Amino acid sequence: MFRKLKIKFIMTNIVSLTIVLLMIFSGIYFSMKYWIKFQADMILNTIARDEKLSSDYNPSLVRFFFVKMDPYGKTIGSDSDITISEDDMETFKDLALKREVTTGNIINNNYKFKFLIVPKGYGSILVFLDYSVEEVMIKPLLFISIFISLVTLTLVFIISIFLANKSIQPIKGSWEKQAAFIADASHELRTPLAVVTSNLEIVMENETETVGSQKKWFGNIQSELERMRKLVDDLLFLARADAEDEFPKDYFDLSGLLFKICDSFMPLAKKKGLALTLYNKDNITAYGNEFRIKQLITILLDNAIKYTGCGGKIHLRLESNATMYQLSIIDSGEGIPKEHIDKIFDRFYRVDKSRSRAYGGSGLGLAIAKCIINEHKGVINIISEVGKGTEVTVFLPVE
Ligand SMILES: Nc1ncnc2c1ncn2[C@@H]1O[C@H](COP(=O)(O)OP(=O)(O)OP(=O)(O)O)[C@@H](O)[C@H]1O
Ligand SMILES: [Mg+2]
């Protein structure tokens, strides 16, 4: 797929450049040709008028001869600045008269002449101008044009290969990322589906049993379905973020929101034996999407609770200054090893896959958090030490 795209890119460059070069060089070639023809006609006319070469022209470049004729076509005089015998002059005169036109080209032996017949008082004058000079000038131009075109096309071909590789790289990267994302998502969905299927099979095998007696299996099915619902919601969110769907923003009471979230997490924290404390001095009003900010805080607080063992402490702190507000979630949990910190924002990335799965995590929480922070033009910073805890700080601009 990428090979085809690369070839297409290179071919488009080469074809468009060939068209441009053809237009430039054929333009130069034909205008030169026309200009030389125009000059030759001028010279022929002035020689016919003056019966000599005007001083306006360089005698070393203009090679001519003329034959003066009486009204019956008999030669009555001639002049030449090239070495040509009288007999040859007569042959050219006869050839020109035979053509029965007043101007044209004659090629004979090694001569190439352009001629013009002009009536005169004594009869007429037949002027011949050597136009091999034209070819001498035009031919190198043609060769130079072809040479320049070939060199340019070769250079453009090489540059195109380099540029094609360079410009396809990010597309290739995101395509591979997308493919990996789909593979991970399918894998994540397969596990709960397998659990649901096996639990249903057990229920079906015991069809005479009551629902109450099979509560355990139904419970498993319910929790796996809940897990699937969360996963699908998360995937949908990320797909929307990739499509750059903007969230509507407005002013909202951030302090109040934080208080409510903290309140809703309190029973869970208590159940796990964790001390959850909130430091929220000011009444802070923030600008953004309230629903998304709630989702962001929930993700971070959920992590802090999930990855902190019994007896641990969790502090939530909200501060603000004139330009930004700062939300810190500090836990005394298991911490994150240094080498994982940069990767935990990647989709489906978990430090310990099986442990995180056991907590019901799929590794999308922080990827979603990062999307929400980016959408609000904020920054997230994580400091962590294994065995001591983690401090997550989110900086969001006031507006
Ligand atoms: N406060 C924390 N303490 C220790 N490890 C953490 C903390 N927060 C995140 N992590 C680590 O980072 C990983 C990624 O976190 P993330 O929230 O993206 O996924 P998850 O919690 O595993 O699943 P999900 O949030 O989708 O339910 C986690 O699996 C965990 O290993
Ligand atoms: Mg999480």
Image (cartoon, rainbow, N blue to C red):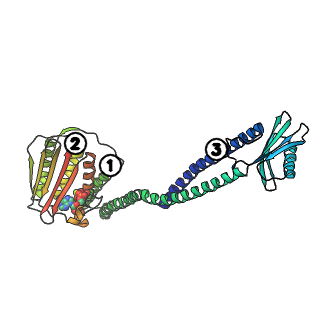
Q: Nearer the viewer, residue 94 or 359?
A: 94
Lateral position of residue 136 relative to residue 322, left or right: right
Lateral position of residue 254 relative to residue 223, left or right: left
Residue 20 - label: none
Where residue 125 sits in the image (x, y, percent)?
82, 39
Label 2, on which residue?
290
Q: Nearer the viewer, residue 133 or 202?
A: 133
* Rendered image quadrant of residue 351: bottom left
* Rendered image quadrant of residue 189: bottom left
Where residue 44 sits in the image (x, y, percent)?
75, 41
Lateral position of residue 25 relative to residue 219, left or right: right
Question: In the image, which is nearer the foreground, mark 1 or mark 3?
Answer: 3
> Looking at the image, is mark 2 or mark 3 earlier in the sequence?
3
Residue 241 - label: 1
Question: For the C terminus, which image quadrant?
Answer: top left
Residue 31 - label: 3
